[in-house]
Amino acid sequence: MGLSTRTKKQNLFANKVFEVFDVNCNGVIEFAQFIRSLSVFHPDALEVEKIKFAFRLYDLRQTGYIECEELKDMVLALFNESDLFLSDDIVETMVDKTFAQADLKEDGMIDLDELKEFIKQCPFLMRNMTLPCLK
């Protein structure tokens, strides 16, 4: 028994989480995949695994790096999931500043190593990557 693409919400955030959990890329999250993927949220999970998971979420086009537009799309999706609505100007400013801080190579993309460095500077960003109830 597993979750299939037919049961997921039709929104960017839910779709991307489903995609990351669907390790076999067959449109079904089997129980073992679910447990393995959920383990990244365990309080004792390695931070590097949490960062890799977050990176896969934000790398919408699966290119191995995060572009500014991908960051913006995911931020908007997360706000939408939280019923938090901000003006376009505020979102643009927030995304632009965040991207500029994280894009250490200043090449218009954030790779995994840059994300790791950025998270070292802003560890609070990983707060939602731990579910204490899994302890």
Image (cartoon, helix red, strand yellow):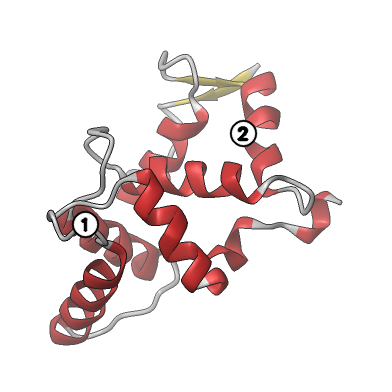
Local SS, label 1: loop
Residue ID at (21%, 57%): 105
Residue type at mark 1 is Lys
- The quadrant holding residue 37 is top right
Residue ID at (77%, 54%): 43
Residue closest to the eye, 31 or 65: 65
Q: CA distance from mark 1 to mark 2?
A: 30 Å
Q: Which residue is mark 1?
A: 105
Residue closest to the eye, 126 or 75: 126
The residue sitting at the front extreme is 105
Q: Earlier in the sequence, mark 1 or mark 2?
A: 2
Residue 11: in sight, yes or no? Answer: no
Residue 46: in sight, yes or no? Answer: yes
Q: Is residue 44 above or below residue 33?
A: below
Residue type at mark 2 is Ser
Q: Is residue 123 above or below residue 49?
A: below
Q: Please give the label number shown on residue 37.
A: 2
Q: Is residue 47 above or below residue 98?
A: above
Across and down, in percent, residue 18 comes to 45, 35
Q: Is residue 62 left or right of residue 16?
A: left
Local SS, label 2: helix
Q: State which mark lies toward you, 1 or 2.
A: 1
Residue ID at (47%, 14%): 24
- The quadrant holding residue 26 is top left
Q: Is residue 134 above or below residue 20?
A: below
